[in-house]
Structure formats: structure tokens, C-alpha cells
Image (cartoon, grey):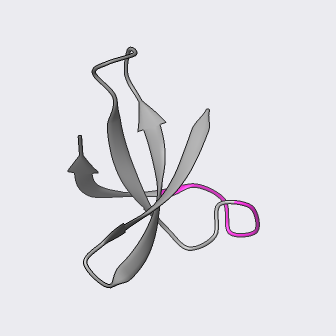
Amino acid sequence: MRIAQFSAGAEPLVGIVEGPPGNEEITVIDGNPFSDGINRTLVRTS
């Protein structure tokens, strides 16, 4: 599993990178994945 931190606008976000190379999508997660676990949202970006 790959976890990425990125920004969309002014707010930093954390997400899970999924998909084959060249076709990856990021599913945004809530909270800190290292202390809160993985809580997926419905927000996806490519």
C-alpha cells in the first residue's frame, strides 16, 4: 500500500495510491493513517 500526502488548494490531504502504473488514482482518507487507521472517503483524484 502506498500513502501520499498532497495539497488541493490550501489544505494538505492524505490518500491511498491505487491502480496500475500510469493509471494511478488517489483515494482521500480521513485523519492520520498511522494512528487513526485507514478511513477512506468518497473523494478520488487521478
**Residue at horizontal 25 percent and vertical 56 percent from the top:** 42
**Where's the N terminus, which quadrant?**
top right
Which residue is nearer to you in this view: 24 or 27? 24
- The residue under the point 33% across, 28% down is 24
Measured along the vertical axis of the image, is residue 29 above or below residue 12? above
36 vs 44, nearest the viewer: 44
Is residue 33 left or right of 29 when viewed as pictured?
right
Residue 25: image quadrant is top left
The magenta region covers: 34-39
Q: In which quarter of the image is residue 9?
A: bottom left
Answer whether residue 35 is magenta in the image. yes
From the viewer's side, name the closer residue of 46 and 34: 46
Q: Position of residue 10 (x, y in %)?
A: 32, 85
Split into 4 quadrants, where in the image is the C terminus? Answer: top left
Q: Who's the residue at 65% across and 60% down the image?
A: 33
Q: Main secondary structure of the magenta part?
A: loop
